[in-house]
Every structure is written in C-alpha cells, then in structure tokens.
Image (spheres, grey):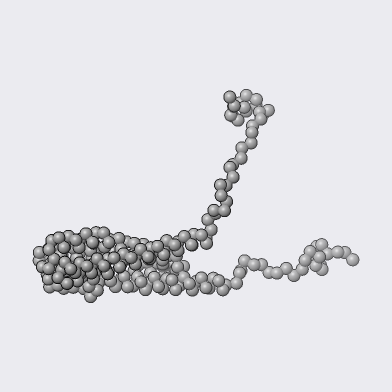
Amino acid sequence: MAKTPAQRIKKHGAKAVVPEHSLPPVINPTTARTPQKAQSNSKLIVIAGVVASLFLFWYLHLLTLNQMTQLSGGLAMPDSLIGGFSQDYIAQLHAAMDEDARGQLNYVHKTAGTLFPLIFGFSWLLLIGTNVARKAWRWAMWAAPLLFAVAHLWSNVAIDSVLAAEAPDAGSVAVASAVTVASWVLFLLSLLCGVAAVFLGRKDSAASAGRPDAAKGPKATGGAGATGGPDAPKS
C-alpha cells in the first residue's frame, strides 16, 4: 500500500523521497473573459429585453386591452386612457362590465400588466447602464424607468379598486387617474431616455475610436550602435 508524503517523512526523515506535485493545467485557456466578450454579452441581454418589452407592450395595450372593449360595450379600459378618466366614466364602465369581465381585467393586470413594467424597467436600466458612462447622467436617466414601473403597478391596483366598488368616491378615482397619466408620461420619458442613451453610447464609442493611442511610447532615435551610446564603437 502506497504511503503518503507525510508518512514517508515521518519514517525516513530528511532522506525521504517525496514525489513532486503540480497543479493541473488550465482546461481551456482560450475561454478567458475579456472586456469585449462581456460587452457583447450585455448587448445581447439588452436586445433580448427590448424585444420582450416591445412584445409585452403590444400584447397588453394593443391586443388584450383592446379586446376587452368587447366586454364593456365599446368603452376603453382605463389603462388605455392617456389623458385620464373621470368618476362618471368609471361609473359607466362599471355598469357596462359584469363581475366576470372585471375579474378578467384583474387577471390581465396580475399577468401581463405586471410582467410588462418589470421587464421594461429592467431592460431600460441595462440599456442606459451599458451606454451611458457618466454616473450622474446614468442615475438621472434611471429614474424614469424605475418610476414608470412603480406607477404602472400602482395604477393596476388603483383601477381594480375603483372598478370593484359599487360607488367609487371621487378621491379614489382621481388618484387612479393621476397614477395612470403619470405612468404614460414616464413611459414616454423612458423611451426618450433610451434613445438618448444609445446616442451617447455611439458618441463615446466614436470618440474612443478616434482618440490616439496614448500607450505607445516615443519612437527610438537610435539603435544599439548610436553615437554616444554605451555600446558605441570606440575609435
């Protein structure tokens, strides 16, 4: 039975022959992480998030909420009213929609109405973070998608609350309307911030590409045999 190096040293002392150990080689040295690969991966994630956000916006506002008008006698859902809504409009919508229709709208709010602001906000945070280098500009642009996600989720709850009440009070309707309008304003502002972030990212890339390489040192003025050098031939 083979003995361990510690057992050999204990038995033979300094004369013990201990085999050398070496670390295993790197499995695949070509898979080293580089800044270019990290930037490429982040761009792929941003593109996937933007595509998912556009799809969810189409599914929620252009498809599902538009189809919900078939259950309300042609009245638009409060989510689609960019300019807000009044207490009379909510009363008309409540009378036109039965309990099942209101439950279906609540289900839409819990599914697509929740996924859309969360995925959109996360994607826009990545979009701005990967394109805007200045910290102050990043935080200023991040505020729009973050506040949009909060306002959109709040409007879902507020709309369901006023539609569920038999006689919603004017204060609750005013809050739901204000949050809905704020959600649309912040959404448009987030889109503008995304366009500005892409523009700033391209501008920084162009500036970096046109910048001279400062890492290059001054050119050598003479070789090893230059006059006056330490290796210059003696006359």
Q: Nearer the viewer, residue 16 or 79?
A: 79
Q: In which quarter of the image is residue 47?
A: bottom left
Please name whichever residue, 160 or 51, is drawn nearer the observer in this view of the structure.
51
The location of residue 181, given as percent across then percent down, is 24, 72
Where, by quadrant of the figure, is residue 217 drawn? Answer: bottom right
Q: Quadrant of residue 163?
A: bottom left
On-image quarter of the N terminus: top right
- 57 left or right of 103 in image: right
In the picture as drawn, the residue positioned furthest to the bottom comes out as 83
Is 79 in front, or is 230?
79
Can residue 174 be seen at all in this image of the molecule? no
In the shown orientation, is residue 204 left or right of residue 176?
right
Left or right, 226 with respect to 211, comes to right
Residue shown at the point (43%, 71%) measured from the top left:
198
Residue at horizontal 42 percent and vertical 61 percent from the top: 45
**Residue at 30 percent of width and 60 percent of height:** 115
Residue at the spot 59% in from the left edge and 45% down from the top edge: 25
Name the residue at the right extreme. Answer: 235
How far from the left and from the top, in percent, is residue 111? 26, 59
The percent coordinates of residue 144 (x first, y second) are: 34, 69
Count the labels in the image. 0
Q: Is residue 27 above or below residue 200?
A: above
Residue toward you, 222 or 59:
59
* Position in image of residue 27 (x %, y %): 56, 47
- Left/right placement of residue 50 relative to residue 180 reads right
Q: In which quarter of the image is the C terminus?
A: bottom right
> Is any atom of residue 72 visible in this view?
yes
